[in-house]
Amino acid sequence: MNRGGFWSDVSKYRVLLLMLLPAVLFFLLFAYIPMAGIVLAFKQFNYNGGIFGSPWNGLDNFRFFFESGDAWRVTRNTALYNIAFIIVNNVLQIAAAILLFEAARPFFRKIFQTMLFLPYFISWVVVGAIAYNLFNYDYGMLNSVLGWLGMEPIDVYNTAAYWPLLLVLISAWKALGYGTVMYLAAITGLDREMYEAAEIDGANIFQRIIHITIPNLMPTLIILMLLAIGNIFRGDFGMFYNMVGTNGILFSTTDVIDTYVFRALTANNDIGMSAAAGFYQSILGFVTILVANWAVRRYDKDRALF
């Protein structure tokens, strides 16, 4: 046994390890150390006792969360929104990547790529302000246009039924550029000889897309899907809070676990129940990624995460 093997490897790869150190510290400080706070889900928190000195109360926080009638609603909304985001966003991103690769010249491809990427860098606060100026009942652009056309105004912020479609479309618009760049990079890395051989054999552009491009995108798609499925019970707090805020009229179709936990903390000051809801969310995400990874391993173990 080579006793100096470990330290010699550390010395040999010290530059790579130093590059990795910031990411390790980030997850250590913001993911692993805070996990000690999970105990709050099983305690009746008080400020005198603190996190570890507060009395235990068993499963009372979970019982209150489930008996309140909100658990099913926020779980359903979180899961359905993320499923819609995964399906719609990936379909649009793959379509946009293929379209840019096949139809656009390299110069115009870079221009369109930049234009698609721009919304990704816009803060959800700004997006929420844009949406408010579009859909406001009294002076929003939408109702102004409808008024010019002699049509009745639409009360978007007081009608919950509109929001599932609006949130899915806004999420697709904001995420389109980021996903398109990843899929476009995967397409660009494919062996061009496959396309040339298919073209010589008489395959048209649609046949090349169906039989070459899409099958070769599957590894990238599966990895991105697995990563997304791991967060299927974790809502985008920035999007939901800045788009909806504290408008209780819309909670039936827009309230997700993250916004529910935030309100429990800020409005009700119920730290124990908030911790219980967050712990419940983490367990759901953990189980989901295990099941998804198991399903991928059954299909093709080389494409699974672990």
Image (cartoon, helix red, strand yellow):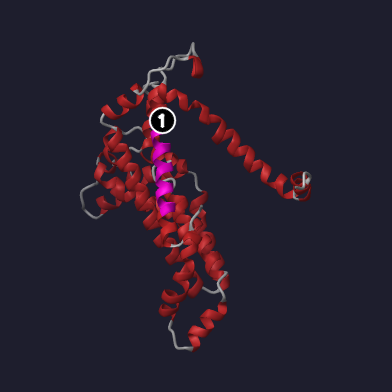
Find the residue positioned furthest to the front.
1
Amino acid on which the number 1 mark rests in the picture:
Phe
Q: Residues within 10 Å of mark 1 (few under 14, many from 20)?
A: some
Q: Main secondary structure of the magenta part?
A: helix
Residue 190: quadrant of the picture: bottom right
Count the marks: how many? 1
Q: Position of residue 103 (x, y in %)?
A: 48, 74
Residue range highlighted in magenta:
277-294
Q: Is residue 278 magenta?
A: yes
Describe residue 51's horizontal placement relative to residue 141 as left or right: right
Instruction: Name above or below for residue 222 compared with residue 230.
Output: below
Q: Position of residue 131 (x, y in %)?
A: 38, 45
Residue ID for mark 1: 262
> Residue at 54% of width from left, 68% of height from top?
109
> Residue at 25% of width from left, 50% of height from top?
147
Describe residue 106's horizontal placement relative to residue 126 as left or right: right
> Residue at 30% of width from left, 24% of height from top?
64
Q: Nearer the viewer, residue 91 or 41?
A: 41
Q: Position of residue 81 (x, y in %)?
A: 34, 47
Q: Is residue 139 visible?
A: no
Instruction: Name above or below for residue 146 compared with residue 269.
Output: below
Q: Is residue 264 magenta?
A: no
